[in-house]
Amino acid sequence: MAREFQFYIVPTPIGNIQDITYRAVEILKSVDLIACEDTRVTQKLLYHYDIRTKCVSYHKYNERERVEFFLNELNSGKNIALVSDAGTPMICDPGEVIIKELIKNNITFTALPGASAVTTFLSQIPRSGEEFTFIGFIPRVEKQIKELAVKYGSSNMVFYDSPERILKTLETIKSVRPKAEVSLGRELSKLFEEVKTGTISEIIEYFKDGIKGEIVCMIYAEAAACDLQIESKIKDLKSKGFKDKEISIILSTLYGLNKNEIYKKSLDL
């Protein structure tokens, strides 16, 4: 017999309503309460699978005030499942506050495997290795976007963005990494699912007339990106008043780089 837990973290479909496991449906039917971001969204899923469990809203704006209520329910012997509107809770969705409290209060919990936009996307794009950096929703501020594009230049950088902002985001990344390769997925698992891979200029051109749907994007690692990172660090140190010789010593010591090459780069910037 499978072990019973008091609290379950349950993934829900990211688009196609059939992308849910048998176990997830059974758990949602068997628990006493379902904690969800938007009860209206979750009720559509529950109705489809004839699940009649009571829903209680739990989102980023009421996380802390709801935690005490859920703890009281758990301590009274009830079981609770946590879901998000779509995908896996805790992956760019609420859950951190209550998970910390579950651990603190020695309440047993488990997470079910299931739908995630990140893994769905990564499983259908070409990659030469397994490593990637997931940063969640990319910032809106242009300066922060550029910093991330440079910082993770030597890693495959995966992020979420909105259809309203993605083209502007790509243009911003292009300004610091003009030769970057990109894969972009939209409407994953839905009727109009589309995944495109190409240079950043090709992707911007392809979607220039607009783009709809939930977005997952990956900027591929670049061999030359390491130079961009070093230049960024040099500029940062210069802005803080360090001199070229000092910069060469600091960066060569911290990162094992050639001191003379760093010094030359610093002089040129």
Image: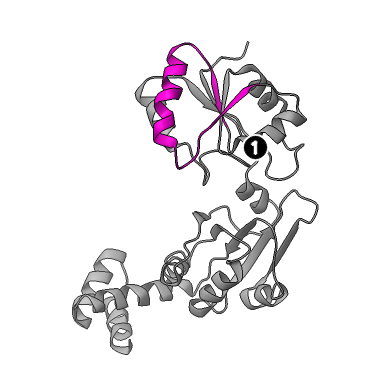
When the figure is inspected, residue 69 is found, relative to residue 169, above or below; the finding is above
Q: Where does the image place residue 127, in percent across and percent down from the top left?
A: 63, 59
Q: Can you say which quadrant of the picture contains the C terminus?
A: bottom left
Q: Where does the image place residue 46, in percent across and percent down from the top left?
A: 70, 29
Q: Examine the rendering and report whether any part of residue 114 can be seen.
A: no
Q: Is residue 76 magenta?
A: yes
The outermost residue toward the bottom is 268
When the figure is inspected, residue 89 is found, relative to residue 23, above or below; the finding is below
Q: Nearer the viewer, residue 73 or 122?
A: 73
Q: Where does the image place residue 132, in percent across and percent down from the top left?
A: 53, 55
Quadrant in the picture for residue 9:
top right
Q: Which residue is mark 1?
A: 40
Q: Nearer the viewer, residue 220 or 118?
A: 118
Residue shown at 39% from the left, 34% from the top: 64
Query: In the rendered structure, which segment of residues is drawn in magenta?
Result: 53-82
Q: Where does the image place residue 124, in percent across and percent down from the top left?
A: 71, 54
Residue shown at 47% from the left, 17% from the top: 73
